[in-house]
Amino acid sequence: MRTSQLLVIVTAIGSALCWLPNSMEPSLDLWWWSPLVVVALLAAISTSQAHRRWVMFCLASAIGTFAGLCLGIAIWPSPDPIAQTFSGSDLVMGTATSIIVSLAACLVGRRISINSGPVLFASWIVLGCCVAIGPVTMLLTPRLVAQRVARNDQLAAERFAGLKNALERVRAESGGLDRTCNGQAIKRNYSGPPFGEKDWDYIGGNYVKQDGYVFGIWCHQTEHGGYALDVWPERQKADGSRKFCADESGRAGCNLAWDGTRNVCSPCRR
């Protein structure tokens, strides 16, 4: 097999594999453009070794990208029905962007000549790394996602406990419903992992996001100033694995539901 043919194969395979980590469910939430760096390196280095085949390298990048995106959609379809409707447009945009990036990289590669010596050896090492980065990232993803979920679960539990205690204190101090949902009053009584300053302005009657979880406080549930605290992961299995809730009864549970008159926290199911 000629070197130029091998370079075309390497470029196509590497361009396909680098998109798979972004398609995984759950994923590491890498930057959407990170595969384009790999695509550009493959196209530029391959062209620098075989100037005359630069068009083939551009085509190999485009075909590899298209194949990788299709494979990712087929293996890991999005759990969000709305996101699924955009799969076709994401496929077209990803392939089109890859063509533009690989074309620019090939034009740069034509200005560089790598023919022999240590530089040639180093270029093959880089090409190998570009091919391997996709599979290696996929192998590491389950463990890294599990670590992220465990960390988010712990922080969410601490924030939930801090908010629940703060709400009870504010409710006791105010003697009713007037200040229970006052974000600044809750903030003064809160002790736990931090929220953003703007979060305190919106958390009463809305949901705010922190470390993969959403937190919401609902007040004025009863004439005596009841409240409901609702906490759940933004993406189940990707950001967290637990649910938390509490209401004015002081009970903590996992499921917040509307009983026709107010939100009620139900015990966790074993």
Image: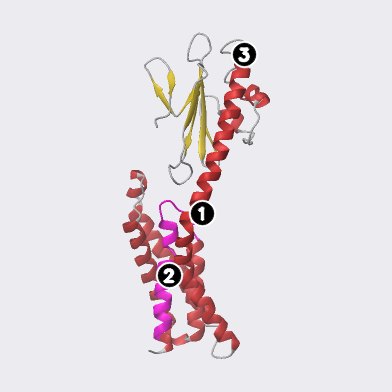
The region drawn magenta spans: 5-33
Number of numbered discs visible in the structure rendering: 3
Q: Mark 3 and mark 2 in contact (Cβ < 8 Å)?
A: no
- Dot 2 amino acid type: Ser
In percent of the image, x 33 and y 55: which residue is there?
Answer: 88
Q: Earlier in the sequence, mark 3 or mark 1?
A: 1
**Residue extending furthest right?**
188
Residue placed farthest to the front in the image? 270
* Place of residue 32 in the rendered image (x, y in percent of width and height, measured from the top left): 48, 57
Residue 225 image offset from top left, x and y in percent: 53, 12
Residue 8 image offset from top left, x and y in percent: 40, 80
**Marker disc for residue 172:** 3
How far apart are the two marked residues, 2 and 3, measured between alpha carbons? 61 Å
Nearer-N-terminus badge (2/1): 2
Picture quadrant where residue 94 is located: bottom left
Residue 29 visible in the snapshot: no
State how far apart marks 3 and 1 are (Cα): 42 Å
- Crowding around mark 3 (Cα neighbors within 10 Å: few <14, some 14 to 19, many 20+) is few
With 85 as the anchor, is 14 left or right in this view? Answer: right
Q: Amino acid at mark 3?
A: Ala
Residue sitting nearer the eye, 185 or 250: 250
Closest to the camera, between mark 2 and mark 3, is: 3
Mark toward the viewer: 2 or 1:
1
- Residue behind mark 2: 15
Quarter of the rendering occupied by the N terminus: bottom left
Secondary structure beneath disc 3?
helix
Disc 1 crowd, CA 10 A, few/some/many (<14, 14-19, 20+):
some
Q: Say which quadrant the C terminus sits in.
A: top left
Please tell me the numbered disc located at residue 144: 1
- Mark 1 falls on what kind of element? helix
Determine if residue 26 is in view. yes
